[in-house]
Image (spheres, coloured by chain):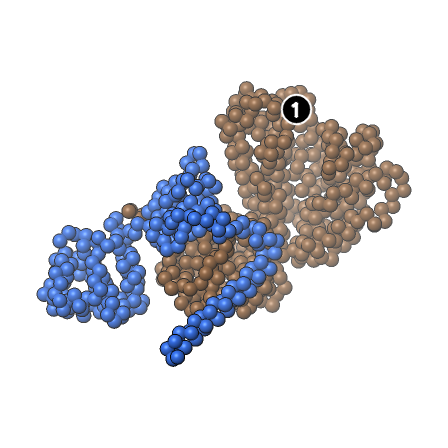
Amino acid sequence: MSVNKRILICQCSERHLLKNVDEASSLVASDEAVVVSDLCKAASEKLPVLGGVAATEFPVVYACHPRAVRALFDFAGSPLPEGAECINLRDPETRPAITPSNESAPAWFPVIDYDRCTRCGQCFDFCLFGVYEKDGDGRVRVANPQNCKNNCPACARICPEAAIIFPKVGESPINGAEISDEDELKSNIKVNVDEILGDDIYAALNARKQKRRSLLNRKKIEQALAERSTCSEDHP
Amino acid sequence: MNKTRQPYGVPAERSERDQLQHAVQAYAAERRLVPPLSMEELRDHAENIATNPGMVDYVMVLLNNEVWRDTVASIPYERRLLLLPLCLRNVSDCPAELDEFGLLCEECGRCNIGELQSIAEELGYVVLVAEGSTVVSRLLEGGKVDAVVGVSCLNALEKSFPHMADGAIPGLAIPLTVDGCISTKMDMDHVRKAIQLKSSKPWKNNLETRRLREIIDGWFAASNPWEAETRTEQMAYEWLLKNGKRWRPYLLACTYSALNDGTTDLPDEIRQLALAVECFHKASLVHDDIEDDDDLRYGQPTLHCQYGIPVALNVGDLLVGEGYRRIASVETRSVEMLRMAAENHRMLCLGQGEELYGLSHQTPFTTGQIIEIFRRKTAPAFGVALQLGAIAAGADEGLLETLRSFSESLGIAYQIRDDLEEYQSGEVLDLRASLLLALAHDHSPVTPLSCESPQLHHIFDELMIPEKAAQLLEHYKNEAIRALNPLQNAFLKSFLRRVTTKMLSGV
């Protein structure tokens, strides 16, 4: 058993009793944690993976009540050592505070498509955490990827050229997907905020509030229509 | 990857946060701190309050809130902006869309944003749930926002503070209690309280600048009875009314108003003084244009181009006399006003004289000489207007001294900005009296004197002259802001802080 395989996370996929499981899973890379879909099931089948976890000196188990967890490991024939830490995800207040270590920090950071980058430097100005640095000739580079905040692709959203890529992000083209329609891209990209705001910020933001509300109304109507049609299908 | 994390500078425990809050309140009340406080002032005070050096930034935020609290409370809800950070939302199940400003929150209840947005909008606020600081910075620049209530991490607050300070924008900031960019936390009751804050007092520390501007424009209307009986008087008044900026009368009237609780009821003596400072200014322009042999002013022929040098000289002299006559017409403290105006008039001529003498001898100026010329030439321009307004409002010597040192630094900064802008625009041909050339010459005595020399740009770049000039500009700007520290009148302090930004923007 290698030392870094010391974390076990139960997803409780049968009952969904645990809070923040996804968050816990996202905080560790897959090669240092064992994620089981259901600890009860794993224990009932006496899966060897439990023995692997229990064999390390300081295992950490993200699952439900600690007494239950220890009993399950006992049942599987692989009792947890004294130094084991059981984190109770049944308690909604428990945040999966996995201390980022060398191995566990998520690999989340931007990369720059230099074919598109115009060196405008907006990302450099925008980032609060010093991920970017500027070379003498104004070329921006990703100097401190470890400073990037997990799941934050904000700098990519403000890039006027869609040159910043976060490979793990959901939305295109920030995820690096091919940009098929340049015109559409331009119209979607953040326009000059000053222009939209004009001289009266209050008027501009109030107008935006109206837009937001009508958008919400439209969404609600669409939802209602969808529900009505689903119900009609159920009861023809 | 190696995450090296600074500990987040907000106390983790609510009790500790409340304790600091009380310490800050007591401190601000005891010292009678007056807004706006500069970053430097905030830091000095915060270092006195914070027991743990890691908490200084947090205490700065609390202190800034403390000095602005009453002002924010006096501002109508409809004129306040609520800023919330996007990171408060639940990333995984937030259904809302984003537009170019930020989140279009649907108030679905999965996070706290919706509740706060709804409370605030109910009261009349405009609300923005923004991502990062770019949009927020744009909003705060340019003095278009009257008051801000904002939730943010310390990092982002640090980025937006300079904009708040430049505009002397009243604001309350509530730092997130947990850092990060996802699933952050805040003290909800603090935020609710900040949003709902309201007093019955009239809007504090805000001059009715638009109204004051209208009054001044009324004083300079061509339709007023100017009693110009002679041809010379007609030329003088016509010249006096040209170009509607009237920046000096505006400074004078605003200073008077600030020292009288923001009144827009300006007595006739303020009108006389406002006309006087504009007379001095326009007189100096007539004479400058002759000295510099300029053909155009305000896009039209200069006075001496129109009527010849002798006539123009005489019209300028008439305007000088007219200015002193109007000051003398004021009933109280007019001798003091006249003495102050005359001393500044002398100073202006000495500065101008140094420059003209240097130019006629083709001797390159040193940086020290140029700064001295700036000090003498430009400080009087602002200083006289501010001091006349202040004397008319009954100011004591301490306040006048503050205004003098403020206008001196501001005047120098303004000239540096002007030189930088002229060089960067590439329009100016004669850099002889420019700070940039003096800086270059200090470093490399072979610097050619003409701007047409192709080597000049190269030398400037190599010696990093524009950067050095920008540093000096920053220095004098900070000196001007520092000069405002002793001011006890928040109207005046806020106004002059905004004036500083306005005059020095654009480079």
Q: Which residue lies furthest to the bottom in this view?
A: A235
Query: Which residue is pictured at 85% across the width and 40% down the height?
Result: B233
Q: Chain A is drawn in which colour?
A: blue
**In the depicted view, which residue is nearer to us: B360 or A105?**
A105
Can residue B74 be seen? no
Image coordinates of residue B24 in percent, x first then y, are: 46, 58
Eyeballing the image, is B506 above or below B253? above
Q: Eyeballing the image, is B386 above or below A16?
A: above
Residue furthest to the front in view is: A236
The hue in which chain B appears in the rendered picture of the protein: brown
Q: Which residue is drawn at 27% across and 59% down?
A: A25
SS for callout 1 = helix
Query: To which chain does the residue with label 1 belong?
Result: B
Residue B60 in percent (x, y) is at 46, 53
Return the x and y of residue B112 as percentages of the image width and height. Answer: 43, 66
Question: What is the total number of numbered labels drawn onto the structure image?
Answer: 1
Name the residue: 39% across, 43% down. A112
- Amino acid carrying label 1: it is Gly
Which one is nearer the viewer's eye here, B88 or A207?
Answer: A207
B497 vs A136, left or right, is: right
**Residue where numbered disc 1 is placed:** B358
